[in-house]
Image (spheres, rainbow, N blue to C red):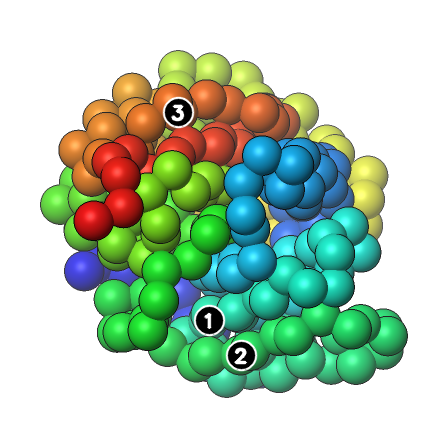
Amino acid sequence: MTISNLSWHNDTVKGYPSTIDRKVPGYQLLHELTSLLLKEKLSTQNITKVLIVGAGGGKELITLTELLPDNVQLTALDPSTKMLHIAKEVLKAKERKHSISFIEGYLEEQDFNQPFDAIICMLTFQFIQGKESRIRFAQYLTQSLHPGAPCFLSTMVDHDQHQNYFQTWRQQLIKHGGTNTEAVQFQESIGKRIFPIDEKELTNVLHQVSFTHISSYFQSLFFKGFVCFKGGTES
């Protein structure tokens, strides 16, 4: 699988929690809506095991533990030791009763004993380059789920309004403490380390690996959140 060469292993990741919050407009809302939608599923589905792919930083864990019952077990997966350390430190400051397991590594390296009842995969797809790599990544997602289980994912999407949106995005970044240099660096990373995906391509990729009922529940400029469900039945 081809993953962009962003380094998640050096000291620059220490600033990730603060910078991502201003780089993705509505970042807090994205996580709250994701957790609330998952919470709604509890009334109709037996959800006790949730996998968070790309959990470093701890945002998903904090939001989930605030909204989900204590019996829900969370598995936090991230390839970066430093990012997982940040997540653990963030959680340490909060009193949480949930069972949380931390795993360092990539999704394709895992051999989970049992499938999960739900997956949350926020802002990870955009670091995967190439259609075949995206299909393989999506395949690992669906293989990690029970049939009928939801997968929540968000990514930067590609469309013809990008250039118009970048000016608005830059203004909100600076308004929330960012710099013009930071904005330029982010824009220059598009196509080099960050790879926005066309929404139709994303839908096709998800369909190819048996995800169904794909719908969007969040959009902020060129960032979108989707929910889909693994097709099929238990064997």
| Label placed on residue 78 | 1
Residue at the image point whose x is 23% and y is 29% from the top = 207
Between the residue at mark 2 and the residue at mark 3, the CA separation in whole angstroms equals 29 Å
**Residue situated in front as seen by the camera: 23 or 111:** 111
Q: Is residue 199 left or right of residue 155?
A: left
Q: Earlier in the sequence, mark 3 or mark 1?
A: 1
**Residue situated in front as seen by the camera: 143 or 126:** 143
Q: Is residue 84 left or right of residue 149?
A: right
Residue at the image point whose x is 42% and y is 58% from the top = 116
Three-letter amino acid code of the residue under disc 1: Asp
Q: In the figure, 62 relative to 175: above or below?
A: below
Three-letter amino acid code of the residue under disc 3: Ile
Label 1's element? strand
Q: Residues within 10 Å of mark 2 (few under 14, many from 20)?
A: some
Residue 146's x, y, as percent? 35, 49
- Residues under numbered marks 1 and 2 in contact, where contact means CB atoms less than 8 Å apart: yes
Residue 100's x, y, as percent? 62, 74
Q: In the figure, 73 relative to 82: above or below?
A: above
Residue 21's x, y, as percent? 71, 50
| Residue holding disc 3 | 214
Whether residue 210 can be seen here: yes
Q: Quadrant of residue 217?
A: top right
| Label placed on residue 127 | none
| Residue holding disc 2 | 102
Q: Earlier in the sequence, mark 2 or mark 3?
A: 2
- Residues under numbered marks 2 and 3 in contact, where contact means CB atoms less than 8 Å apart: no
Q: Is residue 213 left or right of residue 35?
A: left
Residue at the image point whose x is 29% and y is 20% from the top = 200
Q: Quadrant of residue 211?
A: top left
Between the residue at mark 3 and the residue at mark 1, the CA separation in whole angstroms equals 25 Å
Q: Residues within 10 Å of mark 1 (few under 14, many from 20)?
A: many
